[in-house]
Amino acid sequence: MAQIRNRIKTAKPESPFDISLEEELLSAWLELAETINNGLKFSDNFNAETKIVADTGVANTEFSISHTLKRVPTGYIAIKNSTSGVIYNGTTSWTTTAIYLRCSVANANITVIII
């Protein structure tokens, strides 16, 4: 983090406000650098949740996935599927607390990002 401290070039602070502002800006830059250097997660950049469904149940039968987005999701991204099955929308309308999907094969273990 010393690189950031050395790269911030400011005039000599003239007031307590200037000193405080410089300290706050440095703190913000250091926090940002730490976040970026530790790696950003998908959920850090999007209003989304990653959910694991251990068993989708009977083939082509609707199952629900609860979420805490506090809004009706706009979609999902299937990022893991233990089978060759296809994940697709159920017929029940999505709500502010759950989405409804189906899987074309039985007993899939899936991971989805709800967006």
Image (tube, rainbow, N blue to C red):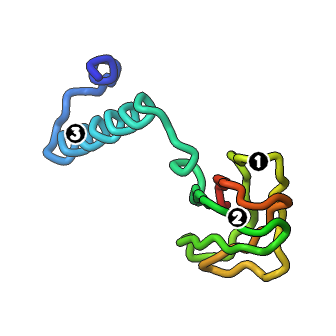
Q: Secondary structure at mark 3?
A: helix
What's the residue at 32%, 17% (across, down)? 3
Task: Give whichever of discs 3 and 2 has the lower sequence position.
Answer: 3
Decide which of tag 1 and tag 3 comes sooner along the chain: 3
Q: Which residue is mark 3?
A: 23
Mark 2: amino acid: Thr
What is the three-letter code of the residue carrying label 1? Thr
- In the image, residue 38 lies at what x, y percent? 41, 32
Mark 1 neighbour density, 10 Å: few (under 14) some (14–19) many (20 or more):
some
- Asked whether the residues under the numbered discs 1 and 2 touch, taking CB atoms below 8 Å apart as contact, a structural biologist would say no
Mark 1, mark 3: which one is toward the viewer?
1
Disc nearest the viewer among 3 and 2: 2
Distance between the alpha carbons at the discs numbered 3 and 2 = 52 Å
Considering every residue shown, the one lying at the far left of the view is 16
Q: Relative to 4, is 22 above or below?
A: below
The amino acid on which the numbered mark 3 sits, given as a three-letter code, is: Glu
Residue 92 location, x and y as percent?
79, 82
Q: Label 2: state its secondary structure.
A: loop
Residue ID at (20%, 28%):
12
Which residue matches tag 1?
83
Q: Is residue 30 above or below residue 59?
A: above
In three-dimensional space, the C-alpha distance between marks 1 and 3, rounded to whole angstroms, equals 53 Å
Q: Which residue is mark 2?
A: 56
Name the residue nearer the viewer: 100 or 40. 100
Which numbered disc, 1 or 2, marks the residue that appears first in the sequence?
Answer: 2
